[in-house]
Image: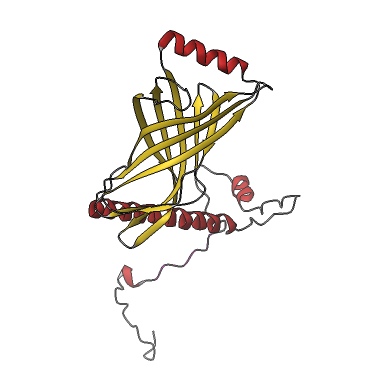
Amino acid sequence: MTDNQKIHPLHDVPLHDVEAPQQHPSAPLVPRNSSKSDDHQQHQPLPMPNHPIRNSKPPKKRRSCCCKFFCWIFSILIILIIAIGIAIGILFLAFRPKIPKYSVDELRVTQFNVSDNNSLSVTFNLTIMARNPNKKIGIDYRGGSHISAWYNDTKLCEGSLPKFYQGHKNVTVLSIPLNGQTQNATGLRDSLTQQFTQVGSVPLNLKVKQPVRIKFGKLKIFKINFRVRCRIVVDSLNTNNSIRIRSSSCKFRFKL
């Protein structure tokens, strides 16, 4: 060896400092349980449907609007009913209303004749007593009233009550004429004769319809109808005689 040549010693190099050569995979990684054909099918694009895709329509708002409208109407009706009930309750507690009372005190027969053409002419004069037992309520009797007298199902005569105002704790006596005429009265006359012969009395029914306005203090409410049904039993129907009323009972109700 020549003098110019020098030998350099090699130092030990740690293994971790030596970079391993990078290996590029020659094929994509595939799961063990799957094959390449499966992976190829999974990446294929889905076929397009033949029919066109329709967009779903948004829900209509008309139904919700109708529901809200009916809810409002129902709520208003409930409020009105509650308000009317409260008003009626206040009026009842403040005025303590009582039902008016009626009675038939006298009946006079001025005409009860059968003519040659077999028609019956009847004229009654009724005396009716009307009582208003209320301390704070007045009754205004309006026009358009009707009263009729009946024997069984046959109307004998009819008339009307006068217009008047009845104040608090008041008793009013009314004299009411009733007139009527019945055609083909042969059967009616025979029935009345048989009734009087067997029983000695004749039952009559009175039907009254009277429009009124009730006055609570200074407040007058809307018009209502009084309906009165009276049943009286008299000892005869002879004219110009003193007719005694054996029994009398009246029932009262009102209708809006």
Q: Residue furthest top?
A: 198
The magenta segment = 19-25
In the rendered image, residue 193, in percent from the top left (x then y), is placed at 51, 13
**Nearer to me, 126 or 226:** 126
Q: Is residue 133 visible?
A: yes
Say which quadrant the N terminus sits in.
bottom left
**Image position of 111 (left or right of 79):** right
Q: Residue furthest right?
A: 50
In magenta stretch: residue 22: yes
What residue lies at 37% left-to-right and 33% top-to-bottom? 104
**5 w.r.t. 22: above or below:** below
In the rendered image, residue 46, in percent from the top left (x then y), is placed at 67, 52
Q: Hey, which quadrant is residue 75 in on the image?
A: bottom left
Q: Is residue 59 visible?
A: no
In magenta stretch: residue 99: no
**Image position of 211 (left or right of 62):** left
Q: Hey, which quadrant is residue 65 in on the image?
A: bottom right
What residue lies at 50% left-to-right and 23% top-to-bottom? 151
**42 w.r.t. 209: above or below:** below
**Nearer to me, 117 or 141:** 117
In the rendered image, residue 228, in percent from the top left (x then y), is placed at 41, 36
Q: Residue furthest front?
A: 240
In the rendered image, residue 123, in percent from the top left (x then y), is placed at 52, 32
